[in-house]
Image: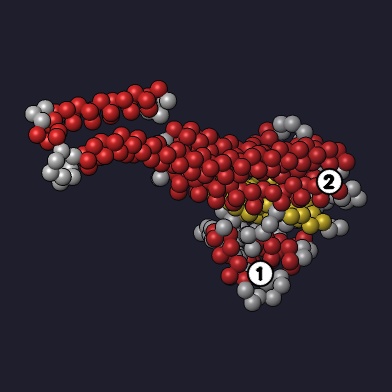
Amino acid sequence: MARQMKKQVRKLGLPPGALVHTGQRKVEHVHIESIRYTDSVCDALRPPSLTPDLLADPAAGVAWLNIDGLHDVGVIETIGQRFDLHPLVLEDILHTDQRAKVELDDRYIYAVLQMLRPENDYIQSEQISLILTDRWVLTFQEAPGDVFDPIRDRIRQNKGRIRKLGPDYLFYTLLDALVDSYFLTLEKIGDRIEALQEEVARNPDPDFLNLIHHLKRETLFIRRAIWPVRELVNNLLREDDSPLITPATRTFLKDVYDHIVQIVDIVETYREMTAGLLDIYLTGISNRMNAVMKVLTIIATIFIPLTFIAGVYGMNFQHMPELSWRWGYPAVWIVMGVAAIIMLILFKRKRWL
């Protein structure tokens, strides 16, 4: 959680709506991508800077403006002035530790959620902000690289219905791509949990304890990012009077809601599995300790009568007939050996060995 909480320090004492980038991922230049399309035409540009032409309304069809890099506050302010975005919306775009949520306005819909990607043994998150207007879809993220490349290919190649429908359908496809990417992240976490379960059950090595705690932290981190998305999609579905989302697109959003409910169930299952991992580990350590104590107890039990015999003949009494007997010493060894063998046979029959 520290990787999320420490960002808040940078905004302490600032007034509401203050535009300060609080993220940790900075790129050298802001990457701008503009895609405008109709049913028959598609224009994709990657200009070096934000120009008035890029912000002009399309003559027809849909315009998608994607911004990679939030450290240049001037770019965000320019876009905010062009689309008349509330200062608090701009603040949320720049403060990249937002809880997933949606805000509905008569002129636009603002949604923010986390994009999750596994990197090595950690789950990295990046905030994605989406804004839907009557002609535009705006997306903001900290650095290049996202899960939207299949959507870009569908637009360029005119596959499916995306170029036949409005910006609300593009907004849905972007949201759906983010939600579907959660399945891939959870699949990798699930594989690690199952593999660790087998190893811990077979050999509860103390080194596994750190791995278990690491998986618990990662699962909680995923839950914190994913759980509010269900509320986000549900709020979109409940706003039946929003003119920005058509009834046809609302049907597709119901499918996204079904997916996020399934994802939340998987996250809760993995939380229980990681908690169970610790129980399996502690049980294995306890069983190993019990096995050691069992062996030591058996050894001690065998030596109890032997110690008794040795103690009796170790007393310094003068009149002990066996001490003067020629075969006394080997006889004592035979008695102790027979006693030990009898106890071993008894333990074997009772399956204590």
- The residue positioned 58% from the left and 63% from the top of the image is 5
Residue position for label 2: 237
Amino acid type of the residue tagged 1 in the rendering: Leu
- Percent position (x, y) of residue 197? 50, 36
Mark 1 or mark 2: name the one nearer the start of the chain: 1
**Residue 247 sits in quarter:** top right
Relative image position of residue 352 (x, y in whole percent):
40, 29
Query: Front-most of 134 and 218?
Result: 218
- Viewport quadrant of the N terminus: bottom right
For disc 1, the marked residue is 19
Where is the C terminus found, in terms of image quarters? Answer: top left
Q: What's the distance in space between the residues labelled 1 and 2, CA to CA?
A: 30 Å
Residue 323 visible? The answer is yes
The residue nearer to you, when weighing 114 against 122, is: 122
Per the rendering, the mark at residue 125 is none
Nearer the viewer's eye, disc 1 or disc 2?
2
Q: Does residue 336 appear to the left or right of 175 in the view shown? A: left
Name the spot of residue 178 as percent of width and height, x first. 66, 43
User: Can I make out residue 189 in this image?
Assistant: no
Q: Are marks 1 and 2 in contact (CB under 8 Å)?
A: no
* Residue at x 76% of width, y 50% of height: 232
Left or right: residue 112 versus residue 236 is left
Percent x, y of residue 48: 58, 55
Residue sitting at x 28%, y 29%? 340
* As drawn, 197 above or below 36: above
Please, which colouring scheme is shown? secondary structure
Query: Measuring 15% from the left and 46% from the top, which residue is drawn there?
Result: 316
Q: Amino acid at mark 2?
A: Leu
Local secondary structure at mark 1: loop
